[in-house]
């Protein structure tokens, strides 16, 4: 379990922004909306990703109650869609009853990041995050944006694999 430094250029995604605990009603609704619009766009869905942050700066992020966690859930797209394509896909997906009006197309760049593959339950991610924090301190990095996760397996997988990524600055 060794972190590495990567550079992450611009990526265009379907995005839903929200707040609440992972697996909660808000979170599950957002995931359904993303996949409904992605299917209506006719593309194969990439692995689900999430960018996470908290606004309570008086505590460490994992000490903040999970219902106060904020997130962007993302499905990367193979290319920037043609103008109007996302709007048309939302209309086609409306019959799914998912909250498709919340889905937007966004492009973002994280730049330099520290990344680590976490293998195991989400509840054990803190150990991997601690390894990343030690690596960042050793190499003179500071956090520079929301924590980013890429879910390589389904949430129901008994042995999940997640890429943990932290944008950094020197």
Image (cartoon, grey):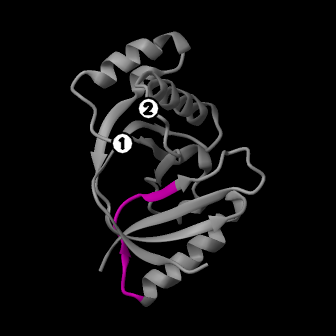
What is the crowding at mark 2: few (fewer than 14 residues within 10 Å), some, or many (at least 20)? few
Would you say residue 147 sits in the magenta stretch? yes
Q: Residue furthest right?
A: 158
Q: Residue furthest top?
A: 95
* Numbered mark located on residue 78 in the image: 1
* Numbered mark located on residue 43 in the image: 2
| Residue in view at x 48 percent, y 35 percent | 44
Image spot of residue 151 (x, y percent): 57, 52
Q: Is residue 24 above or below residue 124?
A: above
Q: Quadrant of residue 111?
A: bottom left
| Residue in view at x 42 percent, y 13 percent | 92
Task: Locate the C terminus by quadrant.
Answer: bottom left
Q: CA distance from mark 1 to mark 2?
A: 8 Å
Q: Earlier in the sequence, mark 1 or mark 2?
A: 2
Q: What element does badge 2 sit on? A: loop
Image spot of residue 4 (x, y percent): 46, 77
């Amino acid at each position: 379990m060794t972190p590495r430094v990567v550079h992450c250029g611009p990526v265009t995604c379907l995005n839903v922004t929200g707040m609440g605990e992972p697996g909660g009603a808000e979170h599950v609704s957002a995931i359904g909306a993303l996949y409904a619009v992605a299917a209506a766009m006719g593309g194969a869905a990439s692995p689900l990703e999430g960018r996470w942050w908290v606004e309570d700066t008086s505590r460490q992020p994992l000490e903040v109650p999970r219902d106060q966690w904020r997130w962007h859930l993302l499905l990367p797209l193979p290319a920037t869609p043609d103008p109007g394509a996302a709007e048309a896909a939302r209309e086609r997906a409306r019959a799914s009853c998912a909250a498709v009006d919340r889905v937007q197309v966004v492009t973002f760049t994280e730049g330099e990041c520290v990344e680590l593959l976490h293998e195991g339950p989400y509840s054990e991610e803190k150990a991997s995050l601690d390894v990343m924090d030690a690596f960042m301190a050793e190499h003179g990095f500071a956090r520079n944006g929301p924590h980013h996760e890429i879910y390589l397996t389904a949430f129901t997988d008994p042995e999940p694999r997640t890429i943990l990524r932290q944008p950094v600055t020197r």
